[in-house]
Each structure stands twice: as structure tokens, then as C-alpha cells.
Amino acid sequence: MSREAWVLVVIAGILAIATLVGAVLLAVRVVRTRRLLTGLGAGGKVAFYGALIYTIFPIDVLPDPIYLDDMGVLAGALIYLTRLVHQRRAAGRQLPGQPDSPSDPDRARRRVP
């Protein structure tokens, strides 16, 4: 192989590793939102599980060494779930797994030193 071909192979490898790391980081952030799923309704559950299944499923729009499509699906699910959380908070409803609001009058009594 010529020198130029090796350079291209190395660059492609670095890009593949970088997109894999990005996809894993996004997947971790999406999984961390799992504790909020009970309060987000069916749309939140579909977005969560759909994004994870798409990421794990071997048949993609782009071949698996290129994780850009997986990153796009995970980022879209994360944006959607974040909007659902903000809408729920704006409506004044507390999500499961979230700390008590500062305006909660019983908060001081429940606090453990």
C-alpha cells in the first residue's frame, strides 16, 4: 500500500473511533433519562426505546463503522425527552426521581442530616 493509502486508512480509523465515542456518550445520556420515563408517557418511552434499538440493531442507514446516523437518532431522542421534561416541569408536575422543589413546605421536615 502506498503512503497516501495508509494515511487515509488511519484518518478513517480515527473518525470511526471518534463517532463511536460520540454515539456511546449520547447513549449513556439517553439511558440516564430512563428514570424519568414513568412520568413522560408513551411518547417518551417510544423515543427512548426506539433510539436504543436503532443504535443496537445491526441494520442501519449507514454501515456500522459510521455512527453518524446512530448519533443523530440518539441526539434527536435526547432533545425530545428533554423537551418533555421541561414541559412537565413547566406544568408544575414533579417527575419521578427528581428532587423536591424548593417551594415544597414539607421539604425541611423530610431532609435527613
Image (spheres, rainbow, N blue to C red):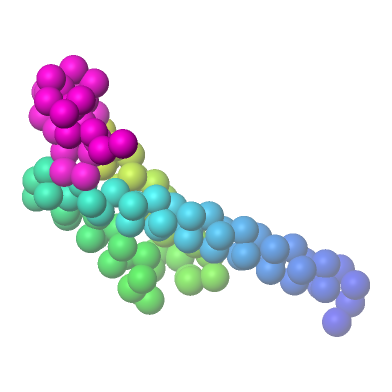
Q: Position of residue 4 (x, y in %)?
A: 86, 68
List the single residue furthest toward the right.
3
Question: Residue at left 33%, top 73%?
Answer: 57
Instruction: Determine which quarter of the picture holds residue 50.
Output: bottom left
The magenta segment:
85-113
Q: Residue furthest front?
A: 113
Residue pictured at 83% horizontal, 73% vertical: 6
Q: Residue at x 23, y 51 (%)?
A: 35
Residue 27 vertical placement versus 112 (above, below): below
5 with respect to 13 (left or right): right
* Magenta stretch: includes residue 42: no
Q: Residue 38 placed where, x, y %?
A: 12, 49
Quadrant of the frame with the C terminus: top left
Q: Looking at the image, can residue 44 be seen?
A: no
Q: Residue 99 appears at what percent x and percent y?
A: 24, 35
Instruction: Describe residue 91's horizontal placement relative to residue 51 as left or right.
Output: left
Answer yes or no: is residue 31 visible.
Answer: yes
